[in-house]
Image: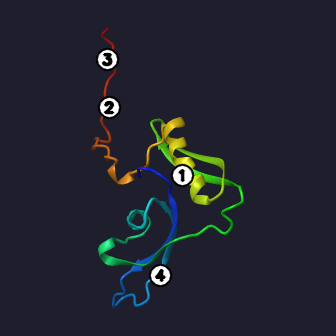
Amino acid sequence: MKASGTLREYKAVGRCLPTPKCHKPPLYRMRIFAPNRVVAKSRFWYFVSQLKKMKKSSGEIIYCGQVSEKSPLRVKNFGIWLRYDSRSGTHSMYLEYCDLTTAGAVTQCYPDMGAQHRALFSLPHRVLPCKHKPRFTTKRPNTFF
């Protein structure tokens, strides 16, 4: 996701559509940081499809609204646990930011991660699987120089 401008915090609640097998499907709630409501809904379906067997065509969003900060006039420290992919693998990290709102701290985090750590947004469904290798074959080393 390209973080241009400031991000806002959204609360998205969705579920699968009711079926004869499951009359009351469970609700799934997420806190999503996005520039607008449309992107927040899109991010909700992206993450839910990774976690559960749900798709936009077989589900519905019940609520998607912006979360307002309790005290936006006081400076607070926010700690962010994150996991990111870089060129050398997947890393976990804890960072602290000083800001007025949670969304402001996350907005600071995005360009910081891209600039200092060369972080890439993880898209695990685009990773190509390794090709099939026969199990019991060996390759002799090349000893002719």
Q: Earlier in the sequence, mark 1 or mark 2?
A: 1
* Comparing labels 3 and 1, the label whose residue is closer to the camera: 1
For mark 4, what is the residue? 26
* Comparing labels 2 and 3, the label whose residue is closer to the camera: 3
For mark 3, what is the residue? 142
Badge 1 crowding class, 10 Å Cα cut-off, few under 14, some 14 to 19, many 20 or more, is: many
Badge 4 crowding class, 10 Å Cα cut-off, few under 14, some 14 to 19, many 20 or more, is: few
Q: Secondary structure at mark 1?
A: helix
Give coordinates of residue 99: x percent, y percent: 65, 53
Q: Are discs 3 and 4 less than 8 Å apart at CB?
A: no
Relative to 34, 74 lies left or right: right
Q: Amino acid at mark 3?
A: Asn
Q: Secondary structure at mark 2?
A: loop
Q: Is residue 34 above or below residue 25?
A: above
Give coordinates of residue 134: x percent, y percent: 28, 41
Query: Residue extending furthest top?
Result: 145
Q: Quadrant of residue 44?
A: bottom left
Q: Is residue 54 visible?
A: yes
Relative to 82, 143 lies left or right: left
Q: CA distance from mark 1 to mark 2?
A: 51 Å
| Quadrant of the frame with the C terminus | top left
Q: Residue at x 42, y 69 (%)?
A: 52
Q: Is residue 26 above or below residue 47?
A: below
Give coordinates of residue 59: x percent, y percent: 35, 77
Q: CA distance from mark 3 to mark 1?
A: 53 Å
Q: Amino acid at mark 2?
A: Thr
Q: Nearer the viewer, residue 129 or 88?
A: 88
Q: Which of the numbered marks, if any, corresponds to residue 107?
A: 1
